[in-house]
Image (cartoon, rainbow, N blue to C red):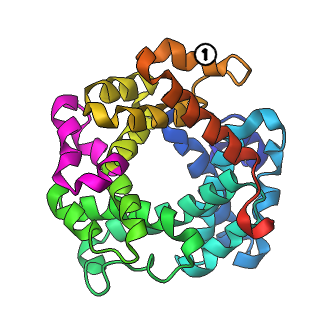
Amino acid sequence: MYRFTGNFSQSILLSNNTCGSSIYHGIILNYFNTEILFEDKKPEDFKPTEICKIFEDKSLLQERWNCAHGTGHGLSIAYNYDVIEAVKRCEEFETKANFLGCNEGVFMESFQKIISDVKKSANGNLFLPCDLVDEKYATECYIYHGSYIIVKNKFNFADSFVECDIIKPEKFIGDCYFGVGKQGVVYHYNNLTDYAKICEDGKREFESFCIKGSAYTFAEQFGIEKSIEYCEIVNESLKGDCYMMVGNRIYQFQDRDEQILENCSNLVNPEYIESCQRGFLERMKSFESKTSHKT
């Protein structure tokens, strides 16, 4: 779209959340590439918050997050996949949601490059670059590392969980499970019954992370209804976690007003309404809360 309009602001305003918001990612990546190749811009010339200034209106929370996330993709390219430097620029975003969204973009772009050359990436330290970045960025890094691991292992979940299990410090193992579940949906999305059991291939203490990662992708790529269908058939003890993720993603598909919490009542089993609402409220809070490095 950016190539068609030649105008960054116009392209962004014509976009929407279709296909997991990938339209935003593509426009911002094209913008970065154009500025680097034809305007000779250096990494430090890009101002992340200025790029996303068009979404300052509080009614555009999701669009603002998409822009921050897409900017992370662009920063990864601008810094030639030096994620250690690129992710530092995400600190320029004020709110927790946009800071983390930018982090996700940096690591997502980096691991997409790694996945494109699995043989090369399989050599050496398995956990690069996640074991080198500051811990405040590590959660998002290990989530996308989990996505890489499941592809590297040709969607063998048991083998992938074994690799997640050796992460140090152990507090990031769950993030890797989340990433495995998040990416694994792509391979099994047509068979919910079998996929609902896949997360059992790992350690029980981290199973809920895998469930939440799966629910995330079902919601973002296939719609809230598909995510709810998945939550309905996971183990009873994990349904609450699953529905929390439904609530976490619900803002992406519903009108942003005081009625939104009622949508959880309309969409899920009454027993898990509270879990859905709690997931939604936590997500909304992240859009307003300041990042720890800003306090």
Residue at 62% in and 41% down: 283
Hey, which residue is sitting farthest top in the picture? 266
Q: Amino acid at mark 1?
A: Glu
Residue at 40% in and 17% down: 269
Residue at 22% in and 57% down: 203
Query: Residue 128: percent from the left, percent from the top?
Result: 40, 80
- Could you say which quadrant of the image residue 202 lies in? bottom left
Bounds of the magenta segment: 182-209
| Residue 152 horizontal side relative to residue 276, left or right | left
Mark 1 Cα shell of 10 Å, populated few (<14), some (14-19), many (≥20): few
| Residue 159 horizontal side relative to residue 95, left or right | left
Does residue 80 appear in the picture of this structure? Answer: no
Our reading of the magenta stretch's main secondary structure is: helix
Does 58 sit above or below residue 260? below
Query: Residue 226: percent from the left, percent from the top?
Result: 36, 25
Q: Which residue is mark 1?
A: 262
Answer whether residue 1 is magenta in the image: no
Residue closest to the eye, 213 or 236: 236
Residue at 72% in and 49% down: 6
